[in-house]
Amino acid sequence: MKVPKLFPALSALLLLLAALGPVSAQRKPRIAVLDFDYATVQSSSQAFFGTNVDIGKGITQMLITNLVKDGSYSVIERSAMDKILNEQNFSNSNRADTTSAAKIGKLLGVDAIIVGSITEFGNETKNQGLGGGGGSGWSGALGSLHRSKSNANVAVNARIVSVDTGEILGVAEGSGTSSRASMGMGGGGGNWNGHGGGGVDFGSSDFQNTIIGEATKAAVQKLSTEVVADAPKISLRSITVEGLVAAVVNGQVILNVGKKAGIKPGDQFTVQRGTQVIKDPATGAVLRTLSTKVGVIQAADVDDVSAVCNVVSGAGFKVGDSIKTVTQ
């Protein structure tokens, strides 16, 4: 039987792939999103809702939801970010500051951080009177017939900031408008007064089905699309971490380096122990230190200057053992 020419070519391709081994997928850019600044629209927002609602936090949560669903980014957990913000006394007035954002992002171990602002948030209602009582077809009317039209407008912008340089890697904008019209006798109609309480769930259908909710959803969706398009502009950071074992307590290994060195919970390290120092016979300068692997440890609890690690493999860890790893 004659073998089709396709088979030898296919076999060669399979052999080549086997020789290359498994291809490791590049990880996604890791980002954090700070609550958007809404200082410029706070008065109009407060008038709209009847109380001060943190619309910056609400819009940020909508953006995060969109980014997680898209899958282009790995987004840091809110709880991890809140812990850092509290430790650094990061106030709401710093929300749009790129320098502060870069510092927070470095402590979080992310590749970039997103800061943003809300530049428009509110609605306007136009009433048009169509005359008083009397007239054919309207005899005996109780009052004027009014046509009312309400427009809700929302506009947001965001910047993607490098945590290493503070450079703005990309910008994104989004705006949304929604309209409602109504007619009524003797009154304006068409006004929507929002939620009377201080808590508004921006992710709920109750909010998103309102006129301002529709405008907000449209604005955030456009913003999300532009943020996703900027993902290739973010360089994945490689961090070299070096340190020493400071103590071994109850089976846990404590290091003399922590968040400031780029360590995050979950990072793993190879522990090495120096066995011989090689010196230049002519100058006495240290050329290198030979070492042997003691084991592998994983960071469990990290503060600014230390890390408590659990043992993954190995035994006999001692004070003075060195650790070094390159994390991405």
Image: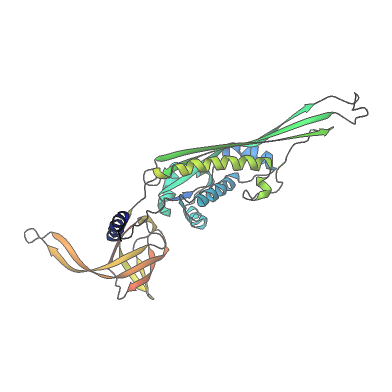
Q: Which quadrant holds residue 254? A: bottom left
Q: Percent x, y for residue 214?
A: 64, 41
Q: Could you tell me residue 158's position as x and y percent?
A: 50, 40
Q: Can residue 27 be seen in the rendering of this structure?
A: yes
Q: Is residue 1 left or right of residue 283?
A: right
The quadrant in which the C terminus is found is bottom left
* Quarter that holds the N terminus: bottom left
Q: Residue at x 43, y 45 (%)?
A: 231
Q: Is 40 situated above or below 317? A: above
Q: In this orientation, which residue lies closer to the viewer: 159 or 248?
A: 159
In the rendered structure, the answer to whether residue 172 lies left or right of residue 240 reads right
All told, the count of numbered labels is 0
Which residue is located at x 61 percent, y 41 percent? 216
**Identity of the residue furthest to the left in this view:** 282
Q: Looking at the picture, how far across and down is residue 123, in whole percent? A: 67, 35
- Depth check: 169 or 291 in front? 169
Q: Residue furthest right?
A: 140
Query: Going 6% across and 59% down the picture, which residue do you hit?
Result: 282
User: Picture coordinates of residue 74 (x, y %)?
Assistant: 45, 53
- The answer to whether residue 198 is visible is no
Q: Is residue 177 left or right of residue 268?
A: right
The answer to whether 94 is drawn above or below residue 262 in the figure is above
